[in-house]
Image: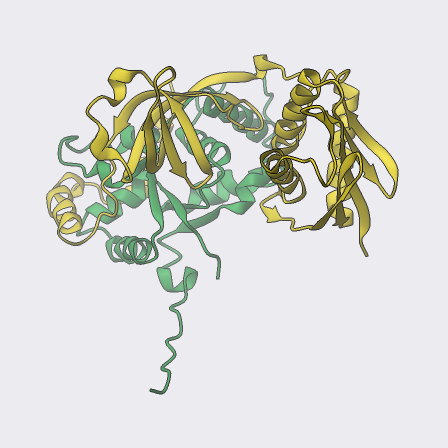
Amino acid sequence: MSDTFEIIIDGIVDGEKISPHTIDITLFKDYISDISDIVKKTIDKQRIEEKAFFLIEEGSLKIVVLASAMFINSFNNDVSVLKASGTLNNIDPTYSKVFEKWQKNAKSNDTLNFNFLHNGQSLLRIDKDSDFKTDLSLYVDVEKILYGTITDMGGKNEPNIHLDTEIGNITIYCSKGDITNQDNRLYKPAAIKVRVKQHISTFECLKKYEFLEFYTYSGKLEGESLDNFINQHSKYWENIPDSAEWTRKLRDENNF
Amino acid sequence: MKIISKVLVDTCFLIELAGKDKECHQNALDYFQYFNENNIEYYLSPIVVAEYWHNSLVADFPSTHFKHLTFNYVDGFQTGNIAKTLKEKNGINANGVDKHDIKDDYKLLAQLIVNNNIDCFITKDGKLIKNYVEPLFESFPALKNVLFIDIKSQPITSTFKPQTVIDFPE
């Protein structure tokens, strides 16, 4: 059995109340994409696919979701944590990203407000007075290697690289010098070492990726390359009778 | 059958793959070929690199054919959490000093937790799975999403059964 979960976006944009006749298609697309992230988030790698349909009413944009108890519980738990702590750190990163973005929107346009309702009862309201914070002290600088395909490079004021990865398109900020004469990398698989801030418990990365260097990734080790590897490396391990034992000994002896 | 897409290789798996005379060389090769045929990406940890390089030449290792993990502050933090959890489980005072406090095994497991898109770990060390991985499931449920393969006790046919080939009539 499904419950009704509603998200109502209300306010004035470009001098017009949000209505079926006035909503800008780009804005509409943005909000629908955020809502889709919320209702299709993943819990313990189990994909929750809620059935969502939307209604646009005079003065508001209303999205109605036929939600499962699992989704409502998960959302409610996180909203309780958010209300109690006032920070976005301890809730699901999918929610915190959207809440933070909408809070920013409401602060730059004080007519905008966002309401989440369960069976008509208000669960959460985000408006110009909302003050949910992100505690950056829980984010640390890490270096990672990202793999994907470069779809764009350049930019006059803020040069960057667009990398299409399995987790979506990532913008990597770089200097002009980093990408000068690198046009031949466009539309090809790439490996890029980046610096980014990562949350120590949720492992969520903030979206500001900083370019460090290009890496080489040659794809599968197969055919002649695999044969060569085995032919060249067999000799290194001839005197090791049991690789598991050898590794275990190395690990046990290497701890001080 | 569990479908996987990314595998972290342990040092002893690499040794078995590289060494023609090793007892599980064929098992390692079967798995590696399965990874290639099914576009399963293989990852190298710097922890494994340090161990494997201990006995081999750096220059001739085909490292560009592997995707690389990094070991950062976040991985260190998880390594500490794992060590503390296991010590508490084993009844050792978490504040006590133990020579084997931070094993490299813990660092690899921490990398599996942090890089939670990696869904398989392959080793020849069954003890690692039994002694360290299984007791951690409760405190680190992310590890339950990882398929742990011991190539010695689990040849490929026991993990990935060959797919049935269906001949459609012309």
Q: Let me know if residue A104 appears in the view.
A: yes
Q: Answer with the quarter of the image where residue A10 lies.
A: top right
Q: Quadrant of residue A108?
A: top right
Q: Residue furthest bottom?
A: B169
**Which chain has been coloured green in this picture?**
B
Considering the image in quadrants, where does the N terminus of chain A appear? bottom right
- Give coordinates of residue B111: x percent, y percent: 44, 32
Horizontal and vertical percent position of residue B6:
40, 46
Q: Colour of chain A?
A: yellow
At x 29%, y 53%, the residue is B32
> B47 or B83, which is in the foreground?
B47
Residue at the top extreme of this rendering: A137
Answer above or below: position of B135 versus B84: below
Up-down: is A13 above or below A3? above
Q: Is residue A213 left or right of residue B161?
A: left
Residue A69 appears left or right of A187: right
- Residue A164, position as x, y percentages in the image: 39, 38
Residue A119 placement (x, y as % from top left): 87, 44
- Which residue corresponds to the image point at 40% horizontal and 50% vertical from the top-left? B150
Q: What is the basis of the colouring in this image?
A: by chain
Residue at screen point 47% across, 39% down? A167
